[in-house]
Image (cartoon, rainbow, N blue to C red):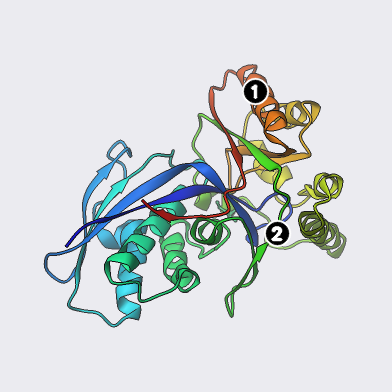
Amino acid sequence: MSAVRVFAPATVANVACGFDTLGFALDAPGDIVEAVRQGPPGVRITTITGDGGRLPLEAAANTAGVAVLALLAALDDRGTGIELALHKQMPLGSGLGSSAASSVAAAVAANEVLGRPFDRAALLPFVMQAEKIACGAAHADNVAPALLGGFVLVRSYEPLDTVRLPFPDDLHAAVVHPHIELLTADARNVLRKTIRLDQAIEQWSNLAGLIAGLTLGDHALIGRSLKDTLIEPVRSMLIPGFDAAKQAALDAGALGCSISGSGPSIFALTRGRADAESAADAMVRALETYQLGSDRFVSRINPHGAVVL
Ligand code: HSE
């Protein structure tokens, strides 16, 4: 049986005002998973590269393995053996959807070697189970865009209802990953569990404005709406130099800037690639003044999501 290799991309979740409900896919970085149908029944992870030995080989404890176990369980398949090789090509604990890239690549690869019993969107519940073991919450704002590509709104979790949103072709993202690690579970634990009505109104007005801006191709409206008055003020305290990096991105022409997922990565959206390059450089320089090194990524919005290589 021949192996199937799948690439799944990094993602920016939350997108400022859309906590747990909005995310988009980048072209790079991302993870590669190779799946092959062979061996005794069950899921085995044979190799992991690029993780510095930190991720578990045990399938039930690894997001790639959990997604494929969930897929086999949904098929009530107790006879098939699937072996996975996971090639991590992105940092752990970065706020770029690292666990989601692994689980999505694994689910898509396993689905292919099984003859594609599920369409893409039907894989979503399996990769959400993987997010649950990764951080304790089955949020879909990384896995949905990694799987489906583009900008994805998770309108409802029960029942699961996702919407792929239109976006202007020239929209680009500048992302910097400061060299500190923040676990999503920890970055969720610091959040307040209740908010006031006036705060809720401000947040959902911005989310509605962002979606209207994406749909209408109104860059100025996108920029005005990229505001997070609930989560960013709390989490940004965990990211040294965040305020300076954000101001630098805005000064360099970004439409807006906020924390990518649960951080510490910071993203900015821009009109065109040239502004994204400038915003990324400006953020890197701002973080350097805080003695913080960082990696930078510039990408269009990746419309494809995971791809079979
Ligand atoms: N919506 C999730 C959070 C994304 O912010 O906790 C985690 O990458």
Q: Is residue 169 visible?
A: yes
> Viewer-proximal residue, 26 or 131?
26
Q: Is residue 279 left or right of residue 41?
A: right
Extreme residue in the left direction: 40
For the residues labelled 2 and 1, the Cα–Cα distance comes to 28 Å
Give the side of residue 225 with respect to residue 174, left or right: right
How many neighbours does mark 2 have within 10 angstroms: few (below 14), some (14-19), or many (20 or more)?
A: some
- How many marks overall? 2
Does 243 appear above or below 97?
A: above
Residue under label 2, please give it: 166
Q: Looking at the image, which residue is at 31% across and 42% down? A: 54
Q: Is residue 153 left or right of residue 113?
A: right
Tag 2, which secondary structure?
A: loop
- Identify the mark nearer the N-term, 2 or 1: 2
Image-based side of 274 in relation to 291, left or right: right
The label on residue 281 is: 1
